[in-house]
Image (cartoon, rainbow, N blue to C red):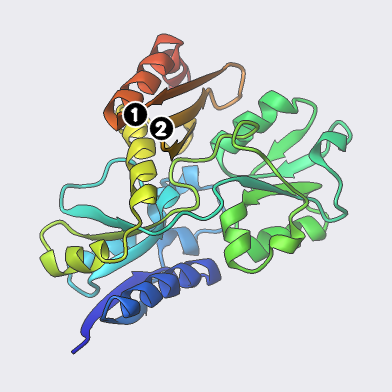
């Protein structure tokens, strides 16, 4: 007999794709999933930047409240939308197989970003994308953009922006890979921690939900997620929605490589650190220690 499990998700096209992918995997594992759509504050407030209304955690607030009142059993999120430190009553019980973690460049006429004239306007709302773009292309104007994938592409096509930067994973999942002008390599633009990974969140003490989540978790993606979030967690509560920080982990038979980027919001100074080790804990510590040694804390304090 199949076991029923209620999946909480935002109602956007991309969020529903993610929830349906989790549902597909749970069905294969012998569960009977039901998708419950929940509107979040982040969805309702499209008129201002996330920083002004409380940060990316607003995309999960109401979904976590549904977990609290037992209206859903698990929640499905983009991992990069989840704050690095969660309240103890929640746990990330699974990480689905990572999609392409790179950032993608979209220009309506297919013009490479390096060929844009000085003063061209680029749309992105992510501080770490903004800082890396400003470091590499100081002649361009980087402006905030809100909305779902389709809305952002429409804004670029309509002339609001000369081009935009989006997560390749979202475009791929929505069947829009063919519209990508080019990809940024993970060295050109280090991805956000968790980019391309779908996470399943549960109540910490819900053994049945944790069992369901573990049945669909992808071990290599879980390893990368733990390392990337581990670096952020070493900064405690000092990071916020203005923090321009990126961490990306890859692994192979010979070890784990972690690339990281840290900058002040205006990209007047940036730091990169790359380390390789076989041990997850050691590589987390090495990356964090180098970022701090090179001035990460000073960059955080300078903005406050």
Residue in front for this viewpoint, 158 or 281: 281
* Residue 47 visible at all: no
Residue in front for this viewpoint, 225 or 40: 225
Kindly report the distance in space between the C-alpha atoms of the residues bearing marks 1 and 2.
6 Å
Circle 1 Cα neighbour tier, 10 Å, few/some/many (<14 / 14–19 / ≥20): some
Residue in front for this viewpoint, 69 or 289: 289
Q: Is residue 94 left or right of residue 40?
A: left
What element does badge 1 sit on? loop
- Coordinates of residue 30 in the picture (x, y in percent): 26, 80
Q: Earlier in the sequence, mark 1 or mark 2?
A: 2
Residue where numbered disc 2 is placed = 256
- Point out the image quarter for the N terminus: bottom left
What element does badge 2 sit on? strand
The residue depicted at 45 percent of the width and 30 percent of the height is 257
Asked if 51 appears above or below 219 in the picture, the reply is above
- Coordinates of residue 229 in the picture (x, y in percent): 35, 38
- Coordinates of residue 162 in the picture (x, y in percent): 81, 47
Q: Is residue 192 left or right of residue 171?
A: left
Residue where numbered disc 1 is placed = 278
Quarter of the image where one finds residue 112 = top right
Quarter of the image where one finds residue 281 = top left
* Residue 135 visible at all: yes
Asked if 274 appears above or below 50 in the picture, the reply is above
The residue depicted at 31 percent of the width and 22 percent of the height is 285
Q: Is residue 74 left or right of residue 9?
A: left
Residue in front for this viewpoint, 175 or 76: 175
Circle 2 Cα neighbour tier, 10 Å, few/some/many (<14 / 14–19 / ≥20): some
Circles 1 and 2, Cβ within 8 Å, touching? The answer is yes
- Coordinates of residue 98 in the picture (x, y in percent): 46, 54
The residue depicted at 68 percent of the width and 28 percent of the height is 134
Pick out the residue farthest to the front.
Answer: 253
């Amino acid at each position: 007999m199949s076991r029923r499990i209620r999946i909480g998700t935002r109602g956007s096209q991309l969020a529903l794709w993610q929830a349906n992918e989790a549902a597909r995997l749970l069905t294969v594992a012998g569960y009977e999933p039901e998708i419950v759509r929940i509107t979040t504050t982040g969805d309702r407030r499209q008129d201002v930047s996330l920083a002004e209304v409380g940060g990316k955690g607003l995309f999960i607030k109401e979904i976590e409240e549904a977990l609290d009142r037992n209206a859903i059993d698990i929640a499905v999120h983009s991992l990069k939308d989840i704050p690095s430190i969660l309240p103890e009553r929640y746990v990330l019980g699974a990480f689905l197989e990572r999609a392409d973690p790179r950032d993608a460049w979209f220009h309506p006429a297919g013009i490479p970003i390096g060929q844009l004239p000085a003063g061209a306007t680029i749309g992105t709302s992510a501080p770490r994308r903004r800082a890396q773009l400003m470091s590499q292309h100081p002649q361009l104007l980087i402006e905030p953009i809100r909305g779902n994938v389709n809305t952002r592409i429409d804004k670029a096509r309509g002339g609001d922006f000369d081009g935009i930067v989006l997560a390749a994973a979202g475009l791929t999942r929505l069947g829009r890979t063919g519209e990508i002008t080019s990809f940024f390599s993970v060295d050109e633009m280090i991805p956000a921690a968790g980019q391309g990974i779908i996470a399943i969140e549960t109540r910490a003490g819900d053994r049945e939900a944790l069992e369901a989540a573990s049945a669909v978790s992808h071990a290599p993606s879980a390893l990368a997620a733990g390392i990337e979030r581990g670096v952020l967690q070493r900064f405690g509560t000092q990071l916020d929605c203005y923090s321009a920080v990126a961490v990306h982990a890859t692994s192979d038979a010979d070890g784990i490589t972690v690339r990281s980027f840290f900058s002040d919001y205006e990209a007047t100074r940036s730091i990169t650190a790359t380390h390789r080790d076989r041990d997850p804990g050691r590589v987390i510590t090495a990356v964090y220690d180098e970022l701090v040694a090179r001035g990460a804390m000073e960059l955080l304090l300078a903005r406050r």
